[in-house]
Image (cartoon, coloured by chain):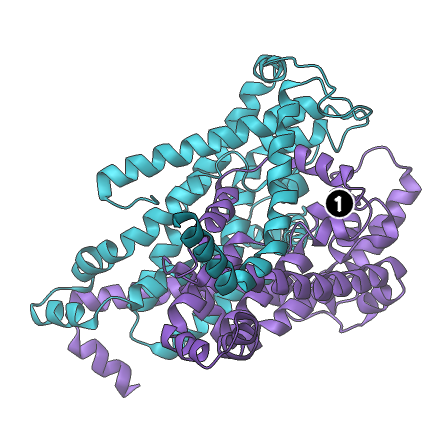
Chain colours: A cyan, B purple
Amino acid sequence: MTINIKRNSVLKHFQRYGALYIMLIIPMAILVLFKYVPMYGAQIAFRNYRITRSIESSPWVGFKYFEKFFDYYGFWPILRNTLTINLYSLLVFPLPLILAILLTHLPFKRMVKTVQNVSYIPHFVSTVVLCSMVIQFTNARTGLINAITAIFGAEPVNFMAHKEYFYPIYILSDLWRDLGYNSIIYIAALTGVSPDLHEAAIMDGASIIKRVWHIDIPSIMPTFCTLLIMRCGQMLTIGYEKVLLLQNSLNISVSEVISTYSYNISLNAASPQFSYAAAIGLFSAVVNLVLLATVNKLIGRTSGNSLW
Amino acid sequence: MSEIRKIFRRNSSGDNVFVIMDMLILLLLFVAILYPLLYVISSSFSGGQMLMGLSLVPKRVSLEGYKAVFEYSAVWNGYRNSIFYTLFGTVLAMVVTVLCAYPLSRTDFKPGKYAMGLCVFTMYFSGGLIPTYLTIRNYQMINTIWAVIVPNALSVYNMIVMRTYFKTQIPVELRESAQIDGCGDWRYLLQITLPLSGSVLGVVALYYAVARWNSYFTEMVYLQNRDMLPLQNILREILIINNPTTEMGISPEAEAKAAERSELLKYSVIVLASLPMMMMYPFFQKSFVKGVMVGSVKG
């Protein structure tokens, strides 16, 4: 009897939701085939994989490739470069928030709209175009930047040939492209604030600065925390496509990061070291996940905003 | 003007200082963002000659840069590939994303929770570049456009944006009454949900199209045949690899020739490559901002 009822309800469930299951077949297949199968394949990090043999027939080597990476003489410089780039980009991380506040507190609406719309445009520029603009603009002979510094009497500099300019170039070009775009989400959060709060504060004689501090910042905090946590979860992998394009023989000592190193020794090498590169990739993915969880906990404890 | 004066009179002096600083900063930002764009555009009409210092007016207007692009068949081949990959990739991605977002937006569909978990996990953890490469190689997809288009047909982020929209913007009562009238899920999706979701469909399509059009890394890894490469990879060859600061080990003559050509067409090719996406932007501008906002709502 109970079995019958159960079978009936299962049948009913599939009768009712059959179409939804069918819809999910293709998306789930893509997810499994292109995301989860590679996760299974990540075990080559612990095996001595050769392109001529299958994953399962490659012998286990334990943590050999992880140790190889940690013992590599370039490990510390690469880690330092990766962290430095991230540190700089975390420093400018609040700028879109500040832009959103500046935009929402300017009383001249037409000017606000114009600035906003123009600031989104660079987001549509591709990484390749952005990097080639950077390379043209920093050229010693014909570059725009040198034309500007020449006004102040500076000697022309080939910025791409000097490694000390690499991080500023990287961060500033990122800012140029995404500052406006990244501010949209904060503007959305700010327009969600009830106008009553601001009106009441104005009645009580609060200045704009006071209202920013006591109304805007608290209401924008949850969004900011979410984005910050997500950003920390990409610490070791972010931005490598752009780093790869801006990398040259003169700045490689500061521009080689974990993910570009892993690419350069595998897919970009004459004799690719797949297991070694996979170990580096797995190391970054795990560190990313740990960072995400740690920052999530930390921020959750101090401000009450966390992802889960 | 009187409007502005009124605002300043109403504010306290401290607030006026804030507003003036605010305005100055935004003006500076406006120039800093717009100037490089305009500089590239006017340089593209200067026939390979430098602009006069900071001026945005070319010494002489010439279309030689564009002519050089027209004569460069690799660019056109890349352009054609890019258009094809973008159109095809976007259509496929939209179909897959809708098929994923709709069932997961249904709160009454309990197994959707597990499927959602499967999706979200991939946002935080991935097998990595090498295992993904080897998997795709194992599927015999290297050097076919499938390697580029199929794995990218489902962006979990875009799917969540769409799911949130379906969940929050389309009333549940609509589905309930449609169901009572005997409307099945397929018909409901195609004839009711999608027609009501124009703005989010537009935004997500724009996201996919921009991502596909601007991507170079995936293509560089999976496509070895030069004729198959999209525009971004050709641009990388012309503008970045051929640049003397990164060049090592090719003959001086070839280098000089490449440098001369890239000098002439570098700005015009940048303009041509960015034009399609920039032209789409005004059409999507309103729904674009809305899409980001919908995506920011926790669902």
Could you tell me residue B10's position as x and y percent?
A: 16, 78
Residue B132 sits in quarter:
top right
Q: Which residue is mark 1?
A: B220
Q: Residue at x 79, y 38 (%)?
A: B247
| In the image, farthest residue toward the front | A1
Q: Is residue A93 left or right of residue A265?
A: left
Assign a secondary structure to mark 1.
helix
Q: Answer left or right for B283 relative to A203.
A: right
Amino acid residing under circle 1: Met
Q: Is residue B124 above or below residue A290?
A: below
The residue shown at (39%, 65%) is: B26
Q: Residue B83, position in %: x, y?
A: 75, 65
Residues packed near mark 1 inside 10 Å, few (<14), some (14 to 19) or many (20 plus)? some
On the rendered image, what quadrant is the C terminus of chain A found in? Answer: top left
Q: Measured from the top left, where is residue B246 in percent x and y?
A: 74, 38
Query: Residue sitting at 20 percent across and 64 percent down?
Result: A208
Which chain letter goes with mark 1?
Answer: B
Residue A297 in percent (x, y) is at 31, 35
Q: What is the residue that sits farthest to the left in this orientation?
A: A204
Residue at 77% from the left image edge and 37% from the top image edge: B138
B90, A248: nearer the viewer? B90
Q: Please tell me whether residue B33 is drawn above or below residue A135 in the rendered image.
A: below
* Residue B65 shown left or right of residue A169 in the figure: right
Query: Where B254 falls versus A96 (above or below)?
Result: above
Q: From the viewer's perspective, is residue A307 above or below residue A196?
A: above
Residue B178 or residue A58, whichever sits in front: B178
* Tally of numbered discs: 1
Residue A213 seen in the current view: yes
Q: Is residue B54 visible?
A: no
Q: Is residue B213 left or right of residue B103?
A: right
